[in-house]
Image (spheres, rainbow, N blue to C red):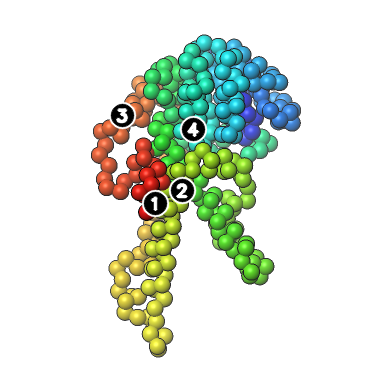
Amino acid sequence: MRISIIGLGLIGGSMGLALRNWAKTEEGQSANLELVGFDAKGKQKALADKMGIFHRYTNTPMDAVKDADIIIVATPVMAVRDTFEDIQNHLKPGAIVTDTCSTKRQVMAWAKELLPTTVSFVGGHPMAGKTASLEEADANLFKGCTYCLMAPVGVKEEAIETIGRLVTIFGANPYFMDAAEHDSYTAAISHMPFLAAAGLVNLVGTSSGWREMSRLASSGFQDTTRLAGGGVAMHLDICRTNSDSIIGWIDRYQKQLSELRELIEQAGLFDERGRPKPESLSEPAGLEQYLKEAAETRERWQASRQQVQLDERSAGVEMPSNKELRSNYTRMLFGSLFTRRKPGQDDPNNPPGSNPSDRK
């Protein structure tokens, strides 16, 4: 089996290392694995070679995909279209192509437009990562993480099962979902934290008092703004390919800030003797309740994450059966058809911001 990885950053390098480890197992040895790597930056290939990740490297993406059974495109999202154009006439019939980008609708559209019908495409996005550096590549990077998969309607079942099993080789848990659903939800829980941090830094950084404030800034400011310290190119690409979902969540965030402002204003009402006014104490949905709800929601989320991690450590990560993979895929295709959404509930096929009326 020949697996080619295009893009040798943290994700591509970590996948290569995980596959090299798998190749040492009984199952991996029977697959007779050959790993081929390519990166447009020569220094990345040199570093990957020094780290012993791949069996061989090529000078072009076209050579990288020649006779490959599986092709993993682990480039920045705005490089995907050019990559598809480069390789489209060099893929062998029956090959399976996947990607690792954090926005999916645009990538799925490019795949449909550019890749030949003789190959299968399954979109992917591992919910893991720490830096963009190949030096930080780790065979265990994906262990226990959720790995989102998007399969176009009509894709061969064999391709779905193959990529699903590849994900389990990485140690991750395959989770099939709709591309619009993915882009809406990741805009909220992945893209918005970075943008909110960037906004806060620019807010105080452009203040006339920043020089003095910066001397006072400590762990709270540092923790909240950590994400703003890097990933500019990646998040620029994300904003360009997922703008409607992100704008929708920004609009909703602005409404939350407006509500929070009103609650703070209400809580700060005092009489002439310096005592809180009755209206600032009797408001049932006041500031205290707002902050309590936020703390409790985060606590429940943390507890559920910890429980999942405990369950995985005790049970180990097992490869799902073909039946389980098909069931997961069926959930993606038909789940929303049999679920009546409550008013105001997020519609993955009409993500926040995609409807102009949402922004009024």
Q: Which residue is mark 4?
A: 106
How many other residues sit within 10 Å of disc 1, few (<14), some (14-19) or many (≥20)? Answer: few
SS at mark 1? Answer: helix
Query: What distance separates the C-alpha of mark 1 from that of mark 3?
Result: 29 Å
Query: What distance separates the C-alpha of mark 4 from that of mark 1?
Result: 23 Å
Quadrant that contains the N terminus: top right
Q: Give the mark nearest the N terminus, 4 or 1.
A: 4
Whether residues under marks 3 and 4 lie with C-beta atoms below 8 angstroms apart, the answer is no
Q: Which residue is mark 3?
A: 334
Q: Give the mark nearest the N terminus, 2 or 3.
A: 2
Q: Which residue is mark 1?
A: 359
How many other residues sit within 10 Å of disc 3, few (<14), some (14-19) or many (≥20)? Answer: few
SS at mark 3? Answer: helix
Q: Residue at x 64, y 21 (%)?
A: 61
Q: Is residue 26 above or below residue 127?
A: above
Q: Give the mark nearest the N terminus, 4 or 2.
A: 4
Query: What distance separates the C-alpha of mark 1 from that of mark 2?
Result: 9 Å
Q: Residue at x 41, y 19 (%)?
A: 155
Q: Give the mark nearest the N terminus, 3 or 4.
A: 4
Q: Give the mark nearest the N terminus, 1 or 2.
A: 2
Residue 331, given in percent of the width and then of the height, sits at 33, 30
Q: Give the mark nearest the N terminus, 1 or 3.
A: 3
Check the image and name the residue furthest to the bottom.
273
Query: What distance separates the C-alpha of mark 4 from that of mark 2?
Result: 16 Å
SS at mark 2? Answer: helix
Label disc, if present, on residue 247 of the rendered structure: 2
